[in-house]
Structure formats: structure tokens, C-alpha cells
Amino acid sequence: MQAVRVICGVALAAFSAGAALAAEPALITKQWTVTVGVEGSVLPTYEGSDRYMLRPFPLFDVRKAGTPPTFHAPRDGFGFGLYDNGRFRVGPTAKIRFPRRESDDTDLRGLGVDWAVEVGAFADYWVMPWLRTRAELRQGFGGHHGVVADVTADVVVPVTPSLTFSGGPRLTLASDKAEDPYYSVTASQAVTSGLPVYTAKGGVHSWGLGAQARYSWSPQWTTYTYLEYQRLAGDAADSPLVTQRGSRDQIQVGTGLTYSFDVPGLW
């Protein structure tokens, strides 16, 4: 009887070890699809300007392999879903705000602003299979220390399996500390810039519309083109930098190219 117990114990140990070895490769064979690319945009030399410049932007995204590409609108920050049930998706997001250098435009004498990074969270909700709504709330660091919120909606229309059109309304709100560095004019800045003293408060920052066309040449290669219009509002629109030297109407046009590939993961 003792011998039977020993044999059974050895068999059970061998079975457990075999099961563990069989399961181990599954831990390292899960695939993720990584998308990288570059976008070129024509946009105002500073927000509120009536002159334009060309600027490149890097692109990056990660999703589980085998899942369809995540829809992205041009105004979306970089983010990834911590929870995604196919209709509702939520996770962290971030945006980089480029520095406003005095050398970029003669309008900006004495009005330079450093780099800013905005970090926060987003939530996507598909009201219908063809209608995505999105909200982002971000805290600024660096050039500004305020809070910015974007609320958008996009009608998404797959014209063919390869071609998709999308577009819809945009709304941006900003706190006092988010508006102040870019639209206020202090007494010392007034002397340098020649603009009157002005204090910008928060509220509705802008509203607008956006549209995009995206074409997938293959599972790996995709191109897109977009047009975004925003109308500055509130204290941003009334800033002397905008009213005396720029424009409340802001347009951004861009085109991008992305490449997707699979990589193994450990989870």
C-alpha cells in the first residue's frame, strides 16, 4: 500500500510539472500589435496666430493582437485602455504642448512659454456602432499648471473595408492656470511686447469641428488625412495677443503614415 502511495505521489508530481511546463509557453506567446508612424501638420505658429507653420509629430499605439485597430480622432491624446468592453473604454492619456518660443514669431516678443505636458485620463463611449464620444481630463506640468478638458464626438463611417470617413464637433475647456501663461499679458510683458495688460481667466476655451479620411493599404500600412477647425472663445479669444495680432479662427491640416507589427508579451 505504501508503494502505491509513492507511485501515485510521483505520478501526480510529474503531471503537475508537465502541466506547468505546458502552461509556461502561454505566458510568453501572447502577442501585442504595436503601431508607429509620423504625421506632418500645418498649424498656427502659436495658438491664436493667423500665420502657419509645418511641424512633424511622432505616432505610437499598442493593442492586443487580433483585435481591430482602435479608432483615433486627430484631437485625441496618446492613451491606452485599462478597461475595454468593446463599447466603453477608459485609461490614462497624455498630450505634449510644444514651447511657444519668441523666435517662432515676431508677435511673441516677451511672451515665450516653456514646454508643457498634460497628463490625465480619458473615456470613450460608443453610443451607436457608428458614433463615438470621448472625454479627456488632463493636468498640466511645465509651461502651465492648469486643467484642460476635451469633449468630442465622431460619426465613423466605413465606406469600404479599407476606407473610413469620420468627423464631428469639438469642445475644449480650460482652468485659469491653463489659460494664463498663453493669453494673459503681465505689466512687464506689456512693456516688452507692446500689448496692453490683460488677465485671462478659465472657461470655454474653444469649440469647433473636425473631419478625417483613413485608408488601410494592408494590415500593416495605413495613411490618413484630416482637417480640424476651432474657434477660440472666452478670455482666450479676447486676449490682445489674439485680437490685435492673430485670429480667433484656428485651422490645422495634417496627413500621416503608420506601420503596425506584432511583438510577444509576457502577460
Image (cartoon, rainbow, N blue to C red):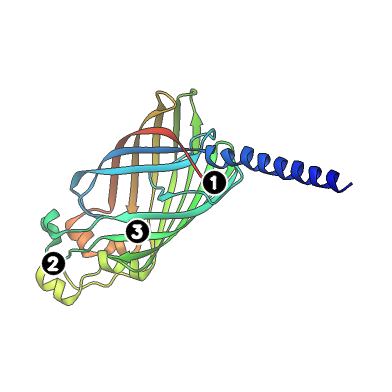
On the question of residue 209 being in view, the answer is: yes
- Residue that label 3 marks: 233
Which residue occupies the extreme bottom position in the image?
A: 187
- State which quadrant residue 38 falls in: top left
Q: Residue at x 23, y 53 (%)?
A: 247
Name which residue type carries label 2.
Gly
Residue 218 image position (x, y, % from top left): 42, 24
Front-lying residue, 103 or 236 = 103
Q: Is residue 103 left or right of residue 125?
A: left
Q: Secondary structure at mark 1?
A: loop
**Image depth: mark 3 or mark 1 in front:** 1
Name which residue type carries label 1.
Trp
Q: Is residue 133 left or right of residue 103?
A: right
Q: Residue at x 68, y 40 (%)?
A: 19
- Residue that label 2 marks: 110
Among the two numbered marks 3 and 1 on one chain, the one whose residue lies closer to the N terminus: 3
Among the two numbered marks 3 and 2 on one chain, the one whose residue lies closer to the N terminus: 2
Which residue occupies the extreme right position in the image?
A: 1
